[in-house]
Image (cartoon, grey):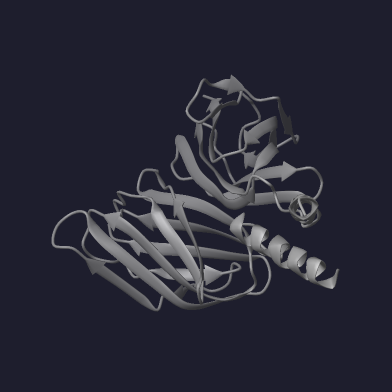
Amino acid sequence: MRHILVLGAVLAAGVLVLAGCPLLPTGVTVTGTVSGDYFDITSDVTVTITQGENSVSVDVPVVSGASTQIGAFLVANVTAGEYAVTVTFENSYSYTGGTTYRVNGGAWTGVDGEVVTGSSAPYTFTITIDSLPISADTTLDIYFGNVG
Amino acid sequence: MRIIPAFGAVAVLFVLVLSGCPLGGVVIVAGTLTADYYSIASDVTVTISQGDEKSWSVPVPVAGTYNQIGSYLFANVPSGVYAVEVSFEANQGFMPGTMYRVDGGAWLPVDDETVTGTGVPYTFSIAINSLAAEAGVTLDLYFGDAE
């Protein structure tokens, strides 16, 4: 009887994982914005947060005002922990504006890496933040700068 | 012997329900907000809710002056039917009639919209009672032209 119960528990956990269902459904939420001025972004902005082998990626659409491109995102049910963040997008400009970010509305800080690749438009921007602690609901705003 | 697999299947289903795991998995809800001559003076807060326990809100900044526009995305939320609430502050108290469309379909009037306040800024509250998000869904909102 004990073997059947153990097997049942293992099967249930396996099904939860296969169903894409978090084993701890009480995860936290990461909310934020991406924006840039005069940047001519030509794709969605892909925001990826990674913790070891676990990775969540969202394609954030941006809309254009007179000079500003901006988008908002929310990722639900994220397991708390320390994450690396990678942001990528395509752009018609080949130079960066000095990307900064802020956590929970705090001070704006320079990102750890930003690289532009490609020899002609569209260029690919890759921006990295090495360590983002997410222990509770967190906001992450990323501003690509003003290249106008 | 046949009873054991059947028992296992029932047990798995039971665990899924007890865990609060949506049987349909998780989905993305995304869309745009647009307004003409509205003087929106705050972020636009979009809230999606399933019952009293599952609710997520994203503050959406808007860009532009006469034509204000914003974009948002909810990722990794459980599939199912959501109630949607949208709120923001604006510098004018006239509501021309908010419309929404799902997956690029026909524009429909929202289920409720109210303006409160006696002076600037006025608070706008808009509700859509039922948004089916069994799979990924786009929800675009147009607050109208308040000129």
Residue at the (42%, 68%) spot, across then down: A86
Number of on-image labels: 0
B41 displayed left or right of B63 = right
Q: In this view, does B71 lie above or below A75?
A: above
Residue at the (29%, 55%) spot, across then down: A90
Q: Which of B114 and B130 is in front in this view?
A: B130
Q: Where is residue B115 in the image (x, y as percent from the top left)?
A: 71, 31
Residue that extends furthest to the left in the rendered view of this protein: A119
Where residue B50 sits, quadrant-wise, is top right
Q: Where is residue B26 in the image (x, y as percent from the top left)?
A: 61, 49
Residue at the (35%, 55%) spot, across then down: A37
B21 displayed left or right of A53 = right
Residue A23 visible: no
Q: In the rendered view of the protein, which quadrant contains the C terminus of chain A? A: bottom left
Q: Which of B98 and B139 is in front in this view?
A: B139
Residue that extends furthest to the front in the rendered view of this protein: B1
Q: In the rendered view of the protein, which quadrant contains the N terminus of chain A? A: bottom right
Q: Is residue A2 above or below residue B107?
A: below
A48 displayed left or right of B16 = left
Residue at the (32%, 72%) spot, across then down: A114
Q: Nearer the viewer, residue A134 or A39?
A: A134
Q: Where is residue A63 in the image (x, y as percent from the top left)?
A: 41, 44
Q: In this view, does B48 lie above or below A2?
A: above
Residue A93 visible: yes
Q: Nearer the viewer, residue B115 or A130?
A: A130
A21 displayed left or right of A113 = right
Q: Where is residue B78 in the image (x, y as percent from the top left)?
A: 66, 48
Residue that extends furthest to the right in the rendered view of this protein: A1
